[in-house]
Image: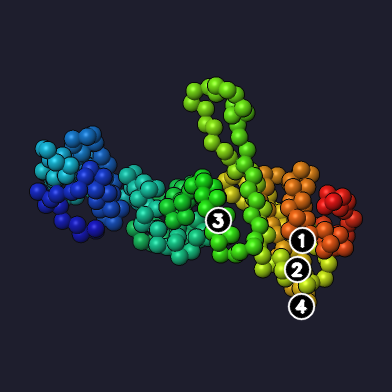
Amino acid sequence: MKEYKWEVGTMYVDRNAFKECVTSYAVHSGRGIWFSKCDSHRCKAVCKEGCKWFAYCHKMKQEDSWQLTSCYKKHTCSKATKIGIMSSQWLSKAFMKKICENPKIKLRSLIKKAHSKWNVDLTMTKAARVKQQALDEINGTYGEQYRRIHDYAAELLRSNPGSTVQIQVERPPEFELETPPPGTDLRPRFQRIYICLEACKRSFMVCRPMIGLDGCFIKTPYGGQLLTAIGWDPNDQILPIAYAVVEAETKDSWRWFLLNLCDDLVVDKIRWCTFMSDQQKVTLNLNLCN
């Protein structure tokens, strides 16, 4: 793109294809190009004040394609380190492969990569936006993932027969009304999920009767808490028994988690178990299992 040759008559699939071409050229050549005109029928890219370079493209009649009709190829300006049209969306596509290989890449690494590759300055805020957009493209947005929570549960049950997956959702208060206000979103929202895999359950049945309980924060945009129940195998290694994702670590969420755990491990096994909470020995009231 640094040596891209602008030729009158060049065809583009649509306006976005032309704008992406101009953006790539501006970044690779280090020019302060911007769009002076951009509407549904025409798009003109010009360089910074004092430079005669420009590229004018317009929409073809009775077609969706666009054509470059005029341009001036020579620059009379110096190179720039800040490219105004270098959007985070364009950068996310450029860094897609790198972020896909290392989703935990640091923002400073992206900034250094942009400076060494194109000699452009990238702020921490923009780098964070670029990384998040790339991750959203790779993994899908968090909202889309939660919408497929039932597909995830079905796949767990298919690949792990005998497992337990319990999903609890909540409805908005307007759902109980006979005539909800227009425009109200009545779709259920994810609240909790409990998972106990059959292999883990059967393994614990032949292990010592000791269960450790703990919870931790989930560092995602939607937050939440991860509740876990673990055991110890004959080699003194941690054995996951069950886990749950809940909205908060409360008495109600713990009771819901333990009730499901009692149903899976049955009373005859769990009534003799010693429970350890936060690595501290405690005595729990197991009447909830009766």
Kindly identify which residue carries mark 2: 204
Q: CA distance from mark 4 to mark 3?
A: 33 Å
What amino acid is labelled 4 in the image?
Asn
Q: Which residue is painted at 90% across and 55% down in the image?
A: 283
The mark closer to the camera, 4 or 1, is 1
Disc 1 crowd, CA 10 A, few/some/many (<14, 14-19, 20+): some
Q: Are marks 1 and 2 in contact (CB under 8 Å)?
A: yes
Depth check: 224 or 239 in front? Answer: 239
Residue 282 visible from this viewpoint: yes
* First of labels 4, 3 by sequence position: 3
Task: Tell whether 174 sits left or right of 29.
Answer: right
User: What's the CA distance linking mark 1 and mark 3?
Assistant: 21 Å
In the picture of the structure, the residue carrying the numbered disc 1 is: 265
Quarter assignment of residue 58: top left
Q: Are marks 2 and 3 in contact (CB under 8 Å)?
A: no
Q: Earlier in the sequence, mark 2 or mark 3?
A: 3
> Residue 235, labelled with which disc?
4
- Please, what secondary structure does the residue beneath circle 2 have? helix
Q: Earlier in the sequence, mark 1 or mark 2?
A: 2
**Crowding at label 3, few (<14), some or many (≥20) Cα neighbours within 10 Å?**
few
Q: Earlier in the sequence, mark 4 or mark 1?
A: 4
Identified by mark 2, the residue type is Phe
Residue 154 disc label: 3
Q: Secondary structure at mark 3?
A: helix
Q: Secondary structure at mark 4?
A: loop
Along the line of sight, the residue nearer the viewer: 82 or 213: 213
Q: What is the three-letter code of the residue carrying label 1?
A: Leu
The residues bearing labels 1 and 2 have C-alpha atoms spaced at a distance of 9 Å
Height in image: 21 above or below 238?
Answer: above
Describe the colour scheme in one phrase: rainbow
